[in-house]
Amino acid sequence: MNKYDFYTTEIDVHYIQNSFDKVFFPTNGFMLKGSISRSLKTDIHISFYNSDLSNISGSTNNFSKLKLEFEKRFILNGNTTAIMGARTGLTFQGYEKDNDVSFSNYGVGAKYFLGGVALQPRNENFVFPGLYEGELLASQFMNLNLGLQVKTGISKVYITPHFNVASVGFHNFNDYLENVFRAKGKWEDSIETSFLLSSGATLSYNSLLGPVNLDLSWVDNINKVRFFIGIGFNLNRSN
């Protein structure tokens, strides 16, 4: 593609509750986020380098989205905190009219981006260690994560071993629902519903400039171990 523009106007209802005892590296409390949104208008414009491909311009079929996020933390002992989390993002596509551009094929700008270790990712981006930030694009996903946050003997330094598993889909909700628990695809192909696994550990330092995170994680199918670094505060929307 030479250029991709996607514009959407949506209306949403959302709920946020946060009882964590700290902004960074909390040891107790929970976080709950939920939102339901509906697109009112979409416009898409795509141009290609290859002159044999026709440029695309128009509106996609409308869609609704459901997002839920939950994380619970509690102290196991003086230095160790248990972390349990779950996230899901679902997309429900409306009827595709004859003159609509297919949302499944071209609605990239309104889908979910998985990957990275940013503590406060951008809207529609979700943490998944082992993947580069926004590496995996999905229409549907369900994600569970477990971890232990261990405070070391060095002040403000933490080690967090973690495990993540997700089921990801790339088409409509009905197709995803049929295969969510018996996925057979490979996530890197972005075609069939797939399972995604990663495990690793993060070394963190709570500095004056914000958290410094060094993560080493293995991710399945590609069987690679990847190293990530994140430094400082994220400039982001406020919740």
Image: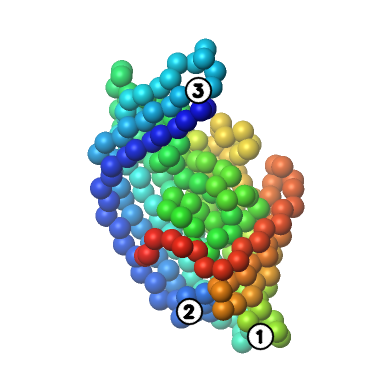
Q: Say which mark, if any, is on residue 48.
A: 3
93 left or right of 147 in image: left
Task: Give the class, few, some or many, for how many residues have Cα within 10 Å of label 1's Cα (few <14, many ≥20).
Answer: few
Residue at 49% across, 70% down: 72
> Which quadrant is the C terminus positioned in?
bottom left
Cα separation, mark 3 vs mark 2, equals: 48 Å
The percent coordinates of residue 165 (x first, y second) are 59, 53
Confirm whether residue 19 shows in the render: yes
Q: Mark 1 points at which residue?
A: 155
Q: In terms of sequence position, does the residue under pointer 3 or pointer 1 come before the other? A: 3
Residue at 66% across, 61% down: 229
Task: Give the class, few, some or many, for how many residues have Cα within 10 Å of label 2's Cα (few <14, many ≥20).
Answer: few
Q: In terms of sequence position, does the residue under pointer 3 or pointer 2 come before the other? A: 2
The percent coordinates of residue 170 (x first, y second) are 50, 35
Q: Disc 1 marks which amino acid?
A: Ser
**Tags 2 and 1 touching, CB below 8 Å:** no
Task: Give the class, few, some or many, for how many residues have Cα within 10 Å of label 3's Cα (few <14, many ≥20).
Answer: some
Q: Nearer the viewer, residue 138 or 156?
A: 156
Cα separation, mark 3 vs mark 1, equals: 53 Å
Cα separation, mark 2 vs mark 1, equals: 16 Å
Q: Name the residue under label 2.
A: 22
| Circle 3 or circle 2, nearest the eye | 3
Q: Which of 145 and 229 is in front in this view?
A: 229
- Relative to 164, residue 8 above or below: above
- Relative to 111, residue 35 above or below: below
Q: Disc 3 marks which amino acid?
A: Phe
Q: In terms of sequence position, does the residue under pointer 2 or pointer 1 come before the other? A: 2
Residue extending furthest toward the top:
52
